[in-house]
Amino acid sequence: MEKNIKKHLKNVRSWVPSFLVVFLLWGVQTSQAQNKSIQTAGDVLLFTLPATALGGSLIIGDYEGTRQFTKGALLNQAVTFGLKYAIDKRRPYGNGDRAFPSGHTSTTFQSAAFIQKRYGWKYGLPAYALASFTGYSRINAQKHDGWDVLAGVAVGIGSAYLFTTPYQREHMELTFASDVDSFVLGFKYKF
């Protein structure tokens, strides 16, 4: 009986290293797939948050908001790329140059700050959560460190806040019409 146990243990010992290697490779692949999904989600948010901010202002007819968003977005891109080229910081793990500040983070935070300041915290809070996830995705993908992301947050929020004012619906309208014999003065109030 003791010989059988020793023989069985010897067999187990022979396949344990193989099992561990397969398990570790599977774990690394699963982890890499999750990291790739997180990075992809951050990349998607890079386009969807600005599209939501701009599209939302256009859909509700807030053309002043559209102008404010555009000014903030242009300033944000100019400052972000200006700093990237001026500082030319290496990315973590040797993944390239021009890491400072994070462009993904500055773009998504500019959009979130515009939504929050223009339309309120009801819409701004989820936008900030998505922008924060984008910043996390850049660190997780090893494209940026915390300083790059924090600088992107500051540039994004700052550029939005410079141009954005709270949304005010037009409640009153004064109209005037005239022809040769008469004129009409009108007043309309929306509740």
Image (cartoon, rainbow, N blue to C red):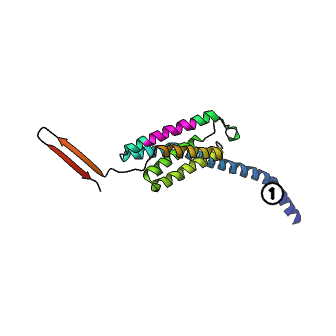
* In the image, residue 60 above or below residue 86: below
- Residue 72 is situated, as x and y percent measured from the top left of the image, at 48, 41
Whether residue 43 sits left or right of residue 163 in the image: it is right
In magenta segment, residue 75: yes
Instruction: Choose between 190 and 178: the one closer to the eye.
Output: 178
Q: Which amino acid does label 1 sit on?
A: Val
Residue drawn at point x = 67 percent, y = 39 percent: 91
Q: What element carries label 1?
A: helix
Is residue 43 visible in the rendered image? The answer is no
Residue drawn at point x = 76 percent, y = 52 percent: 20
In magenta segment, residue 74: yes
Residue linked to disc 1: 12
- Residue 181 is situated, as x and y percent measured from the top left of the image, at 11, 40
Mark 1 Cα-neighbour bin, 10 Å: few <14, some 14–19, many ≥20: few
Residue drawn at point x = 58 percent, y = 44 percent: 152
- Residue 129 is situated, as x and y percent measured from the top left of the image, at 54, 53
Query: Which portion, as a residue range, is magenta?
Result: 68-81
Instruction: Choose between 55 and 146: the one closer to the eye.
Output: 146
Is residue 176 visible in the rendered image? The answer is yes
Whether residue 53 sits left or right of residue 154 in the image: it is left
Quadrant in the picture for residue 83:
top right
Q: Residue furthest bottom?
A: 1
- Residue 68 is situated, as x and y percent measured from the top left of the image, at 43, 42
Residue drawn at point x = 39 percent, y = 43 percent: 64
Q: Does the magenta stretch mainly form a helix, a strand or a loop?
A: helix
Q: Which residue lies furthest to the left in this view?
A: 181
Instruction: Choose between 169 and 1: the one closer to the eye.
Output: 169
Whether residue 185 sits left or right of residue 55 in the image: it is left
Instruction: Choose between 96 and 36: the one closer to the eye.
Output: 96
* Quadrant that contains the N terminus: bottom right
